[in-house]
Amino acid sequence: MKAVIIAAGRGRRLCPLTDNRPKPLVKIFGEPLLGYVIDSLRQLDVTDIIIVVGYHGELIRDYFGEGANCGVQIRYVNNLEFERGNATSVLAAEPFLEKDAPFLLLMADHVIEHSLIRHALRNVDRYPFLCVDQSPQHEQPLDDATRVLVDSNGYISNIGKQIQKYNAFDTGVFVLDAEVLGKMHSLSLDGHPLELNQCWQGLIPDNLRLWACDVSGMFWFDVDTEEDLDLVKEVLENL
């Protein structure tokens, strides 16, 4: 299975650390955030990786190269529209994906344990889906996390940072397919912001159901600020 990693954004909330380098190269214990994602995939023999770059993308290319030092094969896509939103990065990777096969989608700024991704792979036949956590076990700031409302049948009925009724959180790990990308294209309007959350909200009325793959209790951490960096270091030390 192929994996797409979104690594295009600047990460303004991590300034000045991101003034001259992209957020995925900010380090924890000497390892870039993106390196943790790649290593989790390598441990599961997911070695065909597409990285979508944007802000200072050449630095990411220079650091990881073609992936030989990481035990994987990396191809890069340059997203010139990354400032419009993270969904543009998913669409930018489409030419590198097979039309009849699912693919993993991950975020370069989420530290994810490989067992979470393994659980996703074990449920791959239920794609398209998002891995959700209904009871986070590891301390992290959830006020800014993307909230998810899972219905009684296990499907996502609402998603967003501001929704008031929710029962889970978005971990940033998806298994998607070409049908989803086609629907996303229909929502892509030139010049308008295009965030993943907006896409999922737009797909729900279109009867394209996104299953909620429950990974409650498994480790994931969304890094947005310097405070997050300090906190994730503490959590990793305890683990």
Image (cartoon, rainbow, N blue to C red):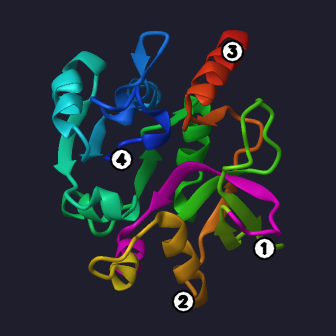
Cβ–Cβ under 8 Å for marks 3 and 2? no
First in sequence, mark 1 or 4: give its number: 4
**Secondary element at image label 1:** loop
Q: Which residues are magenta?
A: 162-183
Q: Quadrant of residue 75?
A: top left
Which label number is shown at residue 206? Answer: 2
The amino acid type found where label 1 is placed reads Asn
- Specify the amino acid type for callout 4: Gly
Q: Which residue is mark 1?
A: 153
Residue labelled with disc 3 = 234
Q: Residues within 10 Å of mark 4 (few under 14, many from 20)?
A: many
Task: Depth check: give the residue in front, 97 or 27.
Answer: 27
Q: Residues within 10 Å of mark 3 (few under 14, many from 20)?
A: few
Horizontal and vertical percent position of residue 60: 24, 31
Q: Which residue has dot 4 on it?
A: 9
Q: Position of residue 154 (x, y in %)?
A: 75, 68
* Disc 2 residue crowd, few under 14, some 14–19, many 20+, Cα 10 Å: few
In primary-sequence order, the first of circles 3 and 2 is 2
Nearest to viewer (mark 3 / mark 2):
3
The answer to whether residue 58 is magenta is no
Residue 209 appears in view: yes
